Image (tube, rainbow, N blue to C red):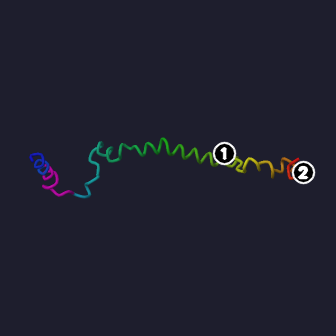
Amino acid sequence: MVVAASGVFLAWLMYGRRPVDPAAIGVPRTAVHKLLLNKYYVDEIYDALIVQPLYRASLWLARVFDPKVDRRPRQRRGRDDPRLGPRPATAPDGLSS
């Protein structure tokens, strides 16, 4: 009973004697408070060290490497390439000679 009463008394000391200003909630008062409000800047550090380098690397790969990749299936890669010459004739049974 004493613990509950002391909790109520402590809450009254903190919030009951003077009204809480809504504009003051969440505004950092010290450097430590700002650090805690910003979650130790973990999101910003992760974005700068992991996300942005991977994003830039993927853009580079898409711009430089991706156009050089042949997307046709392996079976069709040489069929329509004019540099390889004419297509071989097929045998009467439909198989390539």
Q: Residue at x 69, y 49 (%)?
A: 67
Residue depth check, mark 1 versus mark 2: number of the one nearer the observer: 2
Q: Secondary structure at mark 2?
A: loop
**Image-based side of 54 in relation to 78, left or right:** left
* 92 part of magenta stretch: no
Amino acid found under the numbered disc labelled 2: Ala
Q: Pointer 1: what residue?
A: 65
Question: What is the magenta range?
Answer: 10-20
Q: Is residue 15 magenta?
A: yes
Q: Residue at x 62, y 45 (%)?
A: 61
Name the one closer to the observer, 78 or 92. 92
**Disc 2 residue crowd, few under 14, some 14–19, many 20+, Cα 10 Å:** few
Disc 1 and disc 2: Cα gap in Å?
A: 39 Å
Mark toward the start of the polypeptide (1 vs 2): 1
Helix, strand or loop for the magenta stretch, by majority: helix
In the image, farthest residue toward the left: 2
Q: Nearer the viewer, residue 76 or 17?
A: 76
Q: Position of residue 38 (x, y in %)?
A: 35, 47
Report the residue at 70% width, 50% height from top: 71
- In the shown orientation, is residue 5 left or right of residue 65? left
Image position, residue 18 (x, y; %): 15, 56
Q: Which mark is residue 91?
A: 2
